[in-house]
Image (cartoon, grey):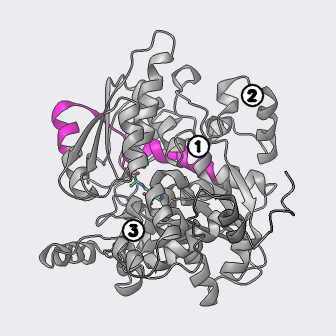
Amino acid sequence: MSSEIAFQRCIIPACAATFSVGESLTACRQCGSLLDVVYDWARVPVPKSLAEFEKKWATRRNPLHFSGVWRFKELLNFAPDELVLTIGEGQTLLRSEPEVARYVGLKNVHLQYEGLNPTGSFKDNGMTAGFTHARLVGAQKVACASTGNTSSSLAAFAAASASLDGAQKLEALVFVGSGRIAMGKLAQGLDYGARTIQIVGHFDDAMARVKEVSKSLGIYLLNSVNPFRLEGQKAIMFRVLEMLNWQVPDWIVVPGGNLGNSSAFGKAFCELKELGLIKSLPRLAVINAAGANTLHRLFNERQLRWNGGQYDRAVVDAFYKEMGAEHREANTVASAIEINRPVNLTKCLRSLDWLNGVVTQVDDQEILDAKAIVGRGGIGCEPASAASVAGTKKLVAAGTIGKSDRVVCIITGHQLKAANTTVGYHSLHGEELEHEFRDFGVKRNPFANKPIQVKNDLDDILRVLGGLSHESWDV
Ligand code: F0G
């Protein structure tokens, strides 16, 4: 056991090796497993009730109190205040959405809209914590592999690091797959000045290369294998609770890609319970895209479970071996979660165990239909985010989620990230639609809001607006 109030520890109980927070690690040096940031709670001053955190909002001129992550600093207390790098992340909203509730078959449903973050996705929650740790260990260069949101967020934080008094600007290096990155995301990274390496291949290839490059060049890695990133993502759950007046919902439903969120959410709730700040735990539902369904297949078809940390590694190895032999590659319109080998698989299994979780998959048609329904409520999201709504619909229909359960769907990213997909869904039909989405099997757009083509002529415009006559047009 370390003598620090915060330290890093291997997630596998049989190993439980500990390391200082002053070290930059993405895996246990003893056994290679993932690491947690853990706290000696007896020595961390934590408020006696969650409602006490509300007071910080009154002093929001302090950037640490404005931040929707650092307002909860006592629950991620691994660095001194002066090292914190914040860009105003986490001013997000929990909205009750009647149209979505009707669509999924629930009395009520809440959407936690993480698209409101400064770079338009939930990643900013984790990146503020990751950069704070990078500064703690004196990093000068930071890197990640990404399907586009992590890289946008990393690039923005690196750019902002220059504005700190006397602080040296961190240099940003991002690796993205050449084919599938959404335009909005690529644009962000370029605009924020990140050195961008587009490699021919998928996210998994980019991930493998960035790990090698970071190791050989001594660059600080900011993917979600970095345990400090996930500390920041815990705050999404703190804010959900805050908006529910500190009542624990029945379900948290989240899209699953690299499985960082699901890992962080489980840890957040278990820590709150351990601290006596909540009495019950929600259930967790992780939703895979059917075209990138490693977790679904391992959990539901091969019954892979956390099993107190003694999960069956042979099952995972065999699955990946088959995947390689059959050249199976992830393929989904939800490019953010187009991932074959989720890096936080084991932590996610642990969360599913802690939170009595379930996993399901939804196809790309279900994803784009759900996305259009989310949009109708005035909350635009990118395709991956809509997996949480499509998954909720499926789990309600299956009776897994009860009709009067209190459900929170995490809307992970903003609509404008992948605007071309949205425009394609709404404006095309028939063969054109099928052609546009030919790789993903999307053939219908029942919730389309088609733009109306009309000549530049008032009579024509009035005709399409319902046959209004010239005389009744009050100008
Ligand atoms: N939703 C969006 C919009 C994402 O960008 C991601 C992940 C996820 C869901 C999945 O979250 O990894 O915590 O399970 N995007 C990563 C990236 C992979 O590189 O931007 P997860």
Q: Residue at x 56, y 68 (%)?
A: 371
Asked whether residue 229 is drawn in magenta, I would say yes
Q: How many marks?
A: 3
* Image disc number at residue 117: 1
Q: Residue at x 66, y 68 (%)?
A: 282
Q: Residue at x 66, y 79 (%)?
A: 104
Give the image location of residue 467, x and y in percent. Answer: 75, 73
Q: Earlier in the sequence, mark 3 or mark 1?
A: 1
Q: Earlier in the sequence, mark 2 or mark 1?
A: 2
Q: Residue at x 67, y 79 (%)?
A: 103
Give the residues in magenta: 212-236
Q: Alpha-carbon distance for marks 3 and 2?
A: 39 Å
**Amino acid on which disc 2 is placed:** Arg
Give the image location of residue 202, x and y in percent. Answer: 24, 59
- Given residues 155 and 207, the one toward you in this image is 155
Q: Alpha-carbon distance for marks 3 and 1?
A: 23 Å
Looking at the rendered structure, the secondary structure element under dot 1 is loop
Q: Alpha-carbon distance for marks 2 and 1?
A: 17 Å
- Given residues 274 and 376, the one toward you in this image is 376
**Amino acid on which disc 1 is placed:** Asn
Give the image location of residue 458, x and y in percent. Answer: 69, 59
Looking at the rendered structure, the secondary structure element under dot 2 is loop
From this view, report whether residue 66 is shown above or below residue 394.
Answer: above
Asked whether residue 318 is drawn in magenta, I would say no
Would residue 9 be seen by someone viewing this image from the given angle? no
Quadrant housing the N terminus:
top left
CB under 8 Å between discs 3 and 2: no
* Image disc number at residue 333: 3
- Given residues 278 and 199, the one toward you in this image is 199
Q: Residue furthest bottom?
A: 398
Q: Which callout, 3 or 2, points to the residue nearer the camera?
A: 3
- Location of mark 2 (residue): 60
